[in-house]
């Protein structure tokens, strides 16, 4: 397996109505050449071909047919010439799609749920929009659209790239119902406000840095400064709590929340000493925006790599292995993989561990 490649492209123009119309016209001509028939399904008229689908305005399939929506699916990879605008295809990396269009937001600043890629133009002229939907660092949808005047109302057409584990799983063309100019202006104002949002961003995958002190948090809980009081103030009362003594005479207290398990250490008088570990077992965000369910290549792309190949059982990603050294190691054994990153502090080490099953994040933790 190879580490991901950084995509770079010269400045390109936004997606246009002409490109979208050419795309749907090509699909109509393909359907006619394939001698497909129109099927009525519910209130819609559909044409199903190998690797693609068309929803038409009527039961007529001809060069003049109007397309309401279209879909290119996974079977398209085996069909010659079946591509979306800009020669984008199913199975393509999300980064390659982003590089095929312009962006005014290279760091993908926005919220942890969405970000605007570009917003260009003003009504009554065409307005070009690029945006994405995500769950933290995981992009789930990339969308490019055009708002155009249609008499006294505004229409919208566009492309949606469904992203699964960093790769395109489907490409959909859509047309939206016409809306009033006032409603369109409100939507565009909302996108403009989102364009100014910078509470969340995509981590650097082109020249990533080693794990740093600032990365040591899970779900907003700073691991170094974390105490039981801070945890319960931010997470609410724990679901369970268990305290045991260790061989040093200290007490180990384990507190459980729905998505987290945290272990605290106290001395024999009951005074809190430090946080031993915090383990993510549910939908929370950890260092570098890592979440359960992400694929391993995406996670590794947020850290430096000294090698292009990850085929070995033990791969040093950066640094020099040693008890008090900065380093990152990937270990692999059949269907299980584990990333270990060591970060020395003043008089102890912090270990970030990320465990994968079939190269998908199953658990991650910080410990000392």
Image (cartoon, rainbow, N blue to C red):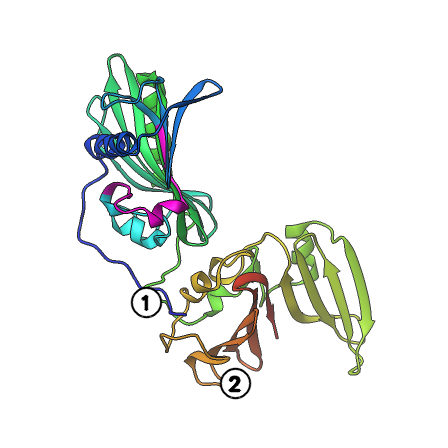
Question: In the picture, which quadrant includes the N terminus?
Answer: bottom left
- Circle 1 residue: 207
Q: Position of residue 245 (x, y in %)?
A: 82, 75
Q: Nearer the viewer, residue 307 or 11?
A: 307
Question: Under tag 1, what secondary structure?
Answer: loop
Residue 152 seen in render: yes
What residue appears at the point 40 percent right and 52 percent down from the top-left corner?
167
- Circle 2 residue: 324
Q: Is residue 77 magenta?
A: yes
What residue appears at the point 79 percent right and 60 percent down from the top-left corner?
241
Q: Is residue 352 magenta?
A: no
Residue 102 seen in render: no
Q: Count the numbered circles shown.
A: 2
- Residue at the front extreme, as displayed: 35
Question: In the picture, which quadrant includes the C terminus?
Answer: bottom right
Q: Nearer the viewer, residue 72 or 323?
A: 72
Work out how far the residue at label 1 is from the one at label 2, CA to CA, in angstroms.
25 Å
Residue 167 located left or right of residue 66: right
Q: Earlier in the sequence, mark 1 or mark 2?
A: 1
Q: Position of residue 78 (x, y in %)?
A: 34, 49
Question: Under tag 2, what secondary structure?
Answer: loop
Q: Position of residue 11 (x, y in %)?
A: 18, 49
Q: Position of residue 31 (x, y in %)?
A: 30, 32
- Dot 1: few (<14), some (14–19), or many (≥20) neighbours within 10 Å? few
Span shown in magenta: 69-85
Q: Nearer the viewer, residue 328 or 31?
A: 31
- Residue at the top extreme, as displayed: 152
């Amino acid at each position: 397996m190879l580490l991901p490649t950084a995509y770079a492209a010269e400045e390109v123009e936004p997606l246009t109505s002409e490109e979208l119309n050419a795309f749907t016209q090509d699909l109509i001509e393909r359907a006619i050449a394939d001698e497909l028939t129109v099927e009525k399904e519910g209130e819609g008229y559909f044409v199903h071909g190998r690797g693609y689908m068309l929803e038409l305005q009527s039961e007529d399939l001809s060069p003049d047919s109007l397309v309401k929506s279209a879909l290119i699916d996974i079977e398209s990879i085996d069909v010659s010439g079946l591509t979306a605008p800009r020669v984008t295809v199913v199975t393509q990396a999300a980064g390659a799609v982003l590089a095929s269009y312009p962006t005014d937001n290279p760091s993908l600043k926005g919220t942890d749920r969405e970000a605007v890629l570009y917003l260009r133009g003003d009504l009554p002229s065409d307005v070009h929009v690029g945006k994405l939907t995500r769950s933290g660092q995981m992009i789930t949808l990339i969308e490019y659209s055009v708002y155009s005047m249609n008499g006294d109302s505004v229409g919208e057409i566009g492309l949606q790239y469904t992203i699964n584990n960093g790769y395109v799983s489907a490409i959909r063309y859509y047309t939206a119902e016409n809306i009033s100019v006032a409603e369109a202006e409100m939507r565009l104002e909302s996108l403009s406000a989102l364009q100014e949002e910078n509470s969340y961003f995509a981590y650097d995958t082109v020249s990533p840095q080693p794990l740093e002190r600032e990365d040591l948090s899970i779900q907003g809980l700073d691991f170094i400064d974390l105490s039981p009081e801070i945890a319960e103030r931010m997470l609410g009362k724990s679901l369970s709590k268990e305290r045991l003594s260790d061989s040093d005479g200290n007490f180990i207290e384990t507190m459980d929340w729905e998505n987290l398990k945290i272990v605290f250490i106290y001395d024999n008088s009951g005074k809190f000493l430090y946080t031993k570990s915090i383990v993510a077992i549910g939908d929370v965000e950890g260092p570098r925006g890592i979440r359960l369910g992400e694929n391993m290549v995406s996670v590794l792309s947020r850290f430096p790599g000294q090698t292009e190949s990850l085929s070995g059982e033990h791969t040093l990603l950066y640094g020099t292995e040693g008890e008090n050294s900065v380093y990152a190691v990937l270990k692999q054994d059949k269907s299980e993989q584990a990333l270990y990153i060591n970060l020395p502090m003043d008089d102890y080490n912090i270990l970030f561990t990320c465990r994968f099953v079939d190269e998908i994040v199953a658990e991650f933790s910080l410990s000392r």
